[in-house]
């Protein structure tokens, strides 16, 4: 499985935008970029995914580099409820299992 | 539409006992995946099942662990003769099709004493 690299932790102030980076230099042409987050004592929650183009949904935006070797999850206005561990995962379409790294622990400062 | 339901939420077993973890997938989802999460680590894939079939058990320990997803009823992850190292959070996910739109449950936290 192609590997992703994320910072171990990040902090952000409440109500400010947050940019969570992910490097995936060995990504293949058919790998989708998925983001999940895990709140304390909860299972992972789907956030967003994309292949080549930038993506927006009600939770976040995903900016994908032109060479696809990196991507950034953007939370436009962080709230305390966004404090979680964020996982960047490559998923070859149709693959039946996700490979989770250790993710980025996001702390939101009130 | 209820999400993925796992029970129990917390399970305490003594060493040597059996642990049975249950997972009811979302309505309409016929693909079930089990993951294990040790403290301060990411989730690790264990097994992927469809109704009455094990599709991929490459992440499952060879001994003491088994999983099933019968035609009727929830998927069961069974751990026989539990040891302290089995203490972890076990998460189940389901999807409507292979590799499409995973939804996770809230997990079962197993503590072996």
Image (spheres, grey):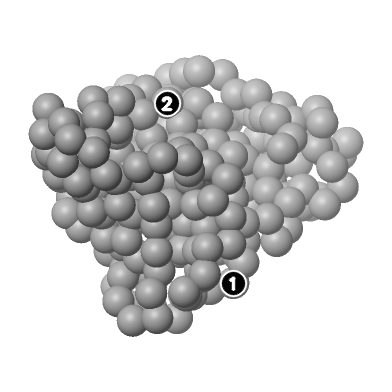
Q: Is residue B57 left or right of residue B79?
A: right
Asked if A18 appears above or below B64 in the picture, the reply is: above
| Mark drawn on residue B41 | 2
Q: Quadrant of residue B97?
A: bottom right
Observer-nearest of B65 and A42: B65
Q: Position of residue B2 (x, y in %)?
A: 29, 73
Q: Residue at x 16, y 41 (%)?
A: B17
Q: Position of residue B51 (x, y in %)?
A: 47, 75
Chain identifier of the residue bearing label 1 in the image: B
Q: Position of residue A65 (x, y in %)?
A: 80, 36
Q: Residues within 10 Å of mark 2 (few under 14, many from 20)?
A: few
> Which quarter of the rendering shows the C terminus of chain B?
top left
Observer-nearest of A23 and A94: A94
Q: Secondary structure at mark 2?
A: loop
Residue labelled with disc 1: B97
Label 2 close to label 1 by CB (< 8 Å): no
């Amino acid at each position: 499985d192609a590997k992703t690299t994320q910072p171990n932790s990040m902090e952000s102030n409440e109500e400010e935008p947050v940019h969570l980076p992910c490097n995936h230099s060995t990504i293949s042409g058919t790998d989708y970029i998925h983001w999940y987050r895990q709140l304390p004592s909860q299972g992972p929650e789907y956030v967003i995914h994309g292949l080549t183009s930038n993506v927006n949904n009600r939770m976040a935006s995903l900016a994908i580099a032109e060479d696809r070797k990196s991507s950034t999850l953007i939370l436009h206005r962080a709230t305390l409820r966004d404090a979680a561990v964020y996982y960047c995962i490559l998923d070859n379409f149709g693959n039946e299992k996700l490979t989770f790294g250790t993710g980025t622990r996001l702390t939101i400062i009130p | 539409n209820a999400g993925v339901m796992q029970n129990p939420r917390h399970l305490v077993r003594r060493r040597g006992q059996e642990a049975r973890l249950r997972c009811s997938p979302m309505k309409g989802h016929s693909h079930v995946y089990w993951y294990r999460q040790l403290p301060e680590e990411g989730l690790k894939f264990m097994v992927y099942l469809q109704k009455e079939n094990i599709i991929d058990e490459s992440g499952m320990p060879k001994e003491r662990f088994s999983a099933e997803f019968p035609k009727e009823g929830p998927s069961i992850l069974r751990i026989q003769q539990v040891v302290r190292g089995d203490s972890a959070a076990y998460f189940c996910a389901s999807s409507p099709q292979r590799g499409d739109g995973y939804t996770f449950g809230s997990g079962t936290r197993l503590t072996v004493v």
